Structure formats: C-alpha cells, structure tokens
C-alpha cells in the first residue's frame, strides 16, 4: 500500500513541519534526525512546543505510533522533554553538551569548574612516597582484588561509619570516582527507556550520562527545602518511574540540604513506589562536623538504595576513588558492569587514600578543607551581601547566584568569558521546562587562595553590574 502525503504545508499551523519527501526508514529515526537538524539550524528554538502527535501524523500521512516513537526517542536523546497534559517541548540544552569539565583556555578567574581546594593535595606527597617505597608496592599493579582488597574495604568501612553508614564489607566495593560509580549503576541497574526522577536542577554530568544511556530524567518540582514529596508522589502515580537520583546534602547546583523531616517524607514516597534510590554523597565528610548529624537517605531505605561516596572533594580529585554501597542482591550486576567498564579499580590510587586515612593525613586534609570552605563562603557573602546567609551553606564548595536576563545560558557564559571569567549558567543543570529564575553556579574551591578568590568574585560582580545581570 502506497501512502501519499497531501500538500498541506500552508494549511496546518504547525510549529514544525518535517520534509515528508526526505523521510527514510525507519521513519521514526529519520524524524528525530530532521528534528535535530531543525534545532541545530535555529528553526526550532528552546522552549518551542512541538505539534501534537496525532496532528503531525496526519500532516505527514504516517501512523500515530511512529510519531510517538520519534518523540520518545527525542526525549531519550535530550532533544525534547514532555509535560503531561501540555505536550512536548524543545529542551533548553538540546544542541549543547552540558558536561562539566575544567576550562582549558587561558582564563583569569576560574569560577565555573567545581574543584576541591587543590592546594591541599601537597599534603599527600609523603603518603605517596610511603606507598610506592613498600616492598609490596608492585602487588598494586596486577589484576588482583578488582573491587578493592579486604584491608582497603575495612578502612573504607570505618570512614563510612563516621559519616553515618554502617555496612558489611560484602556490600561495599570501590569504584574509580563518583562519575565512574554513576556510570556503573546506570549500566547495571537501569535500561534504555527507564525513567529516573531528579531535581529540576541536577548534576550536569548525570544528565549527560542518562542521555548517553537512553534514560529519561523526570524533573520533580521543588521548593526552598528541596524536592517536594507530594509532587514526586503524583508523578510516580502518573508515570512508570523506576529510580530517583538525589544529592541530599548541598545539592549540585542549588546548595539545598534536605532537612530530617524532608528526608523522611521523601523516603516514604520512595518506599511506597519501590523506586531505586541513587544517593550521591559527594561532600560526605561534612556530616562529621554537623551536630546533630543528619541520616544518610540510604539508611532510611536500605533495601532499595545505592549509596555513592566519592572522595574527590573530601580528600583529592586526581586519585579516582569512590566507595559504593548496595544491597547484596545488586552486587553481582554492579560487579559485572564494573568489570566491563574498568576491569578493575586502580589499587594504587585506593592504597594511597587508604594509607592517608590510616596515617591521619586524610583527617588533616578534611579539617583544612572545612576551614577553607567556611572562609570562602564568608568571602562570597561579603562581596554579594544580598545573598541571604544560610548555616546549611557555610561549607559549600560553590554557591548559587541569581541573575536577571533574557539572554540564553550560552550567551551569559560567553559574556563572562570575554571578561576573563569562567562560570556555569543554570541551563546546564536544567531538566525539563525553563524557569524564570536563572542563576550562575559560582565555584568557591577552584582559586588557589582566599586573596585570589576575593579578586575573582569582585571582578565577577563588576562584570555582572556592568551587564545589568545582577539582581
């Protein structure tokens, strides 16, 4: 049967009119390719609502289900997002990678990349010498103990207990950094097409990982206290959501910390709908200084959680070490994914971190970073006094700075870069519809010292005022 498309180009008031004559099989993939080209060329701008699926199918003379498959694929690729009852829209970041990495060009003020007070790394030099000078050092260079040796896990177990996680070594393995752990979790426990609930603004690299895996992120509206449990509950009843990704402490990029009450309320919803929780505790060491300490969300949901504890921010970023805790039932799938991605975690990296814990060097590094983060936040609030001080944010490694503008995120970043400042706009972290409250994420841990941070933040303020961007 031959399908003939009528020439309805001028009759249908559609926001997007694909070229029927250019469609190739499989048609749904060809449609997505045309959609991507329309976005890249500027024909379709971020926020544009795409035609209703049935109307587009009628316009093209194809099956409704073909358009449905195309729209679903476009969401998995990060080109669009859907709002139940409203339609499908072009994503704000449809044609740009939002991955966060260190800026390579010459820049005067690095306030974008979220480093970890790198000058503290020198404290590890004697530890590194100690590890490599041991007679047994070459044993760290083979394939043995791919997920960490028993003595390394026992030391990890002791640190985890300090921050509120009590776990047997059988439920613990060591990955090559936080992003590596997230990659392993998505490969092992989720499939393309699965849905994971996230904050409306969430970790940019997790957005990219999900996009590469074909996993759809579902934005959950929040308030000043973080993700709203009632909204999550409603979305879970409306959609088939499999998992949830959260940073309960100083969430990246909003710096929101969930209260005990909010953690308990979210845990109830997560348990009710049997979601698999991915808890990203990238600033785990701060819980050691908090009185009273807040419970790790995973401890409220021990049977359906994966807990990720990266040591990049607490100790050192260049040694890729992360403690990953899961149920015994999830361990085989996680190990298989880890073997296929890494073969093994670097035993040398892990041994340096382990020795740093055993010798007290790790403790001194964490104490120093706590003090430096406190000072950095004081500097930020002095230069930007309009930002309401918050006890929960006093040791954040970055801050959220609201701006006023009709410019795109890329345009704002470009203007700052032209002035020698590297910053990240909130668009990089956005999942779902745009919001009328854009902001910049300002790193406080990338400059070499307090004096350099004062200079960089002062320069940033001058640029924002001159551009009429500062609220």
Image (tube, rainbow, N blue to C red):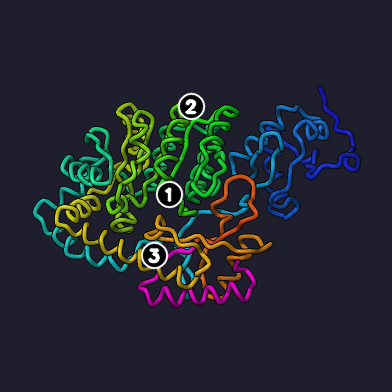
Q: Is residue 207 left or right of residue 134?
A: right
The label on residue 273 is 2
- Label 1 neighbour load within 10 Å: few <14, some 14-19, many 20+: some
Q: Is residue 229 left or right of residue 24?
A: left
Residue under the image location 33 percent in, 34 percent down: 326
- Label 2 neighbour load within 10 Å: few <14, some 14-19, many 20+: some
* Residue position marked by numbered label 1 in the rendering: 257
Q: Nearer the viewer, residue 1 or 109?
A: 109
* Residue position marked by numbered label 3 in the rendering: 445
Which quarter shows the N terminus? top right
Mark 1 or 3: the one toward you: 1
Q: Kindly indicate whether the residue at mark 2 contacts the one at mark 3 (C-beta within 8 angstroms).
A: no
Q: Tell me where residue 193 appears, x and y as whole percent.
A: 55, 32
Mark 3 or 2: the one toward you: 2
In space, the residues marked 3 and 2 are separated at their CA atoms by 38 Å
- Please report the bounds of the magenta region as a residue range: 442-471
Q: Nearer the viewer, residue 289 or 131?
A: 289
Q: Is residue 236 left or right of residue 326?
A: right
Residue under the image location 35 percent in, 43 percent down: 308
Which quarter shows the C terminus? bottom right
Q: Establish if 121 lies above or below 159.
A: below
Q: Earlier in the sequence, mark 2 or mark 1?
A: 1
Q: Is residue 332 left or right of residue 89?
A: left
Q: Is residue 311 visible?
A: no
Q: Kindly indicate whether the residue at mark 1 contacts the one at mark 2 (C-beta within 8 angstroms).
A: no
Q: Tell me where residue 91 appears, x and y as whole percent.
A: 64, 47
Residue under the image location 86 percent in, 42 percent down: 13
- Quarter assignment of residue 216: top right
Residue under the image location 36 percent in, 72 percent down: 448
Q: Tell me where residue 465 appears, x and y as whole percent.
A: 60, 74
Callout 1: SS? loop
């Amino acid at each position: 049967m031959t399908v003939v498309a009528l020439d309805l180009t001028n009759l249908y008031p559609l926001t997007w009119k694909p070229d029927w004559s250019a469609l190739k099989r499989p048609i749904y993939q060809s449609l997505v390719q045309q959609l991507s080209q329309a976005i890249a060329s500027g024909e379709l701008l971020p926020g544009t609502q795409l035609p209703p699926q049935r109307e587009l199918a009628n316009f093209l003379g194809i099956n409704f289900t073909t358009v449905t498959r195309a729209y679903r694929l476009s969401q998995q690729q990060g080109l669009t997002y859907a709002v139940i009852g409203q339609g499908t829209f072009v994503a704000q970041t449809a044609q740009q990678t939002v991955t966060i990495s260190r800026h390579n060009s010459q820049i005067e003020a690095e306030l974008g990349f979220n480093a970890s007070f790198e000058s503290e790394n020198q404290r590890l030099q004697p530890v590194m010498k100690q590890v490599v000078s041991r007679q047994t050092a070459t044993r760290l260079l083979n394939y043995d103990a791919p997920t960490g040796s028993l003595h390394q896990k026992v030391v990890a177990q002791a640190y985890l207990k300090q921050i509120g996680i009590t776990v047997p070594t059988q439920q613990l393995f060591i990955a090559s950094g936080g992003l590596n752990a997230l990659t392993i979790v998505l490969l092992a426990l989720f499939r393309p097409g699965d849905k994971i609930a996230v904050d409306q603004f969430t970790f940019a690299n997790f957005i990219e990982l999900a996009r590469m895996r074909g996993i759809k992120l579902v934005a959950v509206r929040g308030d000043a206290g973080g993700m709203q449990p009632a909204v999550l509950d409603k979305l879970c009843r409306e959609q088939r959501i499999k998992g949830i990704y959260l940073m309960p402490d100083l969430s990246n990029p909003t710096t929101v910390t969930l209260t005990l009450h909010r953690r308990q309320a979210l845990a109830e919803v997560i348990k009710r709908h049997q979601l698999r929780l991915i808890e990203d505790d990238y600033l785990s060491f701060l819980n050691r200084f908090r009185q009273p300490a807040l419970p790790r969300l995973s401890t409220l949901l021990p049977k359906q959680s994966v807990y990720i504890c990266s040591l990049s921010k607490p100790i050192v970023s260049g040694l890729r070490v992360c403690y990953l805790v899961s149920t015994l039932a999830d361990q085989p799938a996680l190990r298989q994914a880890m073997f296929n991605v890494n073969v093994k975690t670097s035993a040398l990296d892990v041994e340096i971190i382990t020795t740093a814990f055993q010798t007290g060097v790790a403790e001194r590094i964490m104490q120093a970073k706590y003090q430096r983060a406190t000072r950095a936040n004081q500097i930020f609030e002095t230069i930007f006094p309009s930002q309401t001080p918050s006890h929960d944010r006093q040791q954040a490694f970055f801050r959220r700075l609201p701006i006023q503008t009709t410019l795109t995120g890329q345009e704002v970043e470009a203007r700052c870069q032209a002035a020698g400042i590297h910053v990240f706009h909130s668009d990089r972290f956005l999942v779902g519809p745009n919001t009328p409250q854009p902001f910049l994420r300002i790193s406080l841990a990338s400059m070499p010292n307090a004096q350099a941070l004062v200079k960089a933040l002062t320069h940033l303020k001058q640029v924002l005022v001159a551009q009429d961007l500062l609220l």
